[in-house]
Image: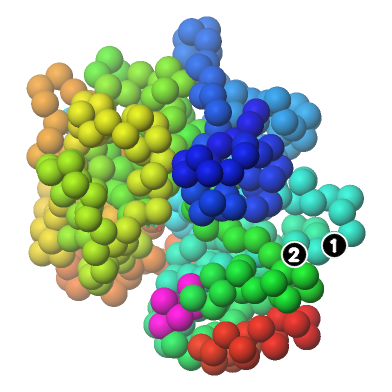
Amino acid sequence: MKYYSTNHQTPDVTLQEAVVKGLAADKGLFMPERINTLPTSFFEQMSQMSLQEVAYQVAQAFFGEDIPADKLKQIVYDTMNFNIPLVKVSDNIYSLELFHGPTLAFKDVGARFMARMLGYFVSGQDKLVNVLVATSGDTGSAVANGFLGVEGIHVYVLYPKGKVSLIQEKQFTTLGKNVTALEVDGTFDDCQRLVKSAFMDDELNAHMQLTSANSINVARFLPQAFYYFWAVAQLQDANIVCCVPSGNFGNITAGLFGKRMGLPISRFIAANNRNDIFYQYLQTGQYSPRPSIATIANAMDVGDPSNFARVLALYDNSHAAICQEISGATYTDAEIAEEIRRVYETSGYLLDPHGACGHRALREGLRPGETGFFIETAHPAKFKDTVENIIGKPVSIPQRLQDFMKGTKQSINMTSQFADFKTYLLAE
Ligand SMILES: *Cc1c(COP(=O)(O)O)cnc(C)c1O
């Protein structure tokens, strides 16, 4: 399968190139040239299959031409080795709990898959591949844990000193092995700038092979389609609506791919916090990125969603076509908090601030006869202080998260000057 760039200014590439490079040479995002549909027989049998079996069939449709079946199966089965239950919250609303993986957020799926696929592509190559990732918290932990112990790859996580929560910091500073944490004296934007400058620096690129592991990588976003199929396999309802709490729009784009492959989801809702650039686009047809503002659903604080280009490409730039399949919702912090409190009090189900946007959008947006599921993107304990303040009760921390707290922090101090970062990498 060939992959084209959404900017159309560069030749098509192979899957291997798309995964190793991440971003196209013309700065566009890679898209597969075709989206294969799955046979009717698969949809009929889906509800009798395991999560790993469902995921493998979907992976075959994407990657079957490019990776031998036994290898692909191993990558999928290794990635999807935790539960993704669909939990009933109320009569017609279900939560697809994507927080049962190692770092308790949905990013575990894409990060683990990408680590294994990149590991496969670089195996047998004697040059080490270096993954640089800037994080404001969640991405770093999922990527670091996903790549931990993968041969031939070293990961550098850059994070802003004093600006991530203790539990987040522990998730990527205590691992050791092939993961190095760099504690940058600056902001998240400084971290991102250092990473971008490194990718553009000829001397560094001649010295070491660099790649990125953010959600623009096809190996991170496409596998997220797996769990949309799994949700429908469990739900088996006639009129399904899916709501996705969205930031960079990688997650919802994977769901839209699922629909193209034949998955019976009648429509999607993209739930935003106050960073509602996509919501405004749906209303006006104008895409106007703007600086992000901080909210309690901070993983969705994105002012220029990087996967918007993929949504446009999927619908041939047609605003009308996009509006036919996707609607939007936007919520303030007060509305998010109110939803967490309300759902906890009426059903006992504890939402995290991101999932709360998803739940509220379904509660307000479902029409008669529709059944909805939303993606519960992270465990509420990851936002312990926020959630405790809202419900006025302690939130217990799952054992997996507590285990990270026991580790010893190991990090390297870094200034926000590119010259210092470069000197450090050149000495590696
Ligand atoms: C990353 C993230 C999101 C946003 O997902 P996108 O794919 O960027 O739209 C939502 N919730 C949580 C908890 C996240 O970590």
* Up-down relation of residue 171 to residue 288 (above or below): below
Residue visible at 10% across and 39% down? 364
* Residue 179 seen in render: no
Q: Main secondary structure of the magenta part?
A: helix
Q: Is residue 428 above or below residue 349?
A: below
Viewed as shown, does residue 130 lie left or right of 214?
right
Rendered location of residue 408, percent (x, y): 62, 84
Q: Nearer the viewer, residue 63 or 358?
A: 63
Q: Is mark 2 within 8 Å of ligand 1?
A: no
Question: Looking at the image, do the residues carrying marks 2 and 1 touch, with CB atoms under 8 Å apart?
Answer: yes
Dot 2: element: strand
Amino acid marked by disc 1:
Lys
Sequence order check, earlier mark of 2 and 1: 1
Q: Quadrant of ligand 1?
A: bottom left
Horizontal arrangement in the rendering, residue 279 relative to residue 425 (left or right): left
Q: Which quadrant holds the C terminus?
A: bottom right
Considering every residue shown, the one lying at the far front of the view is 9
Task: Judge by depth and name the residue closer to the eye, 370 or 316.
Answer: 316
Tell me the kind of residue under disc 2: Gln
Q: Residue at x 31, y 43 (%)?
A: 244
Residue at 55% across / 32% down in the picture?
32
Write the residue at 81% across / 64% down. Answer: 128
- Direction from residue 208 to residue 303 in the image, left or right: left
Q: Quadrant of residue 152?
A: bottom right
> From what the image shows, is residue 143 above or below residue 230?
below
Report the residue marked by disc 2.
209
Pick whichever, 108 or 87, lies toward us: 108
**Which region of the structure is painted magenta?**
187-192
Q: Quadrant of residue 321?
A: top left
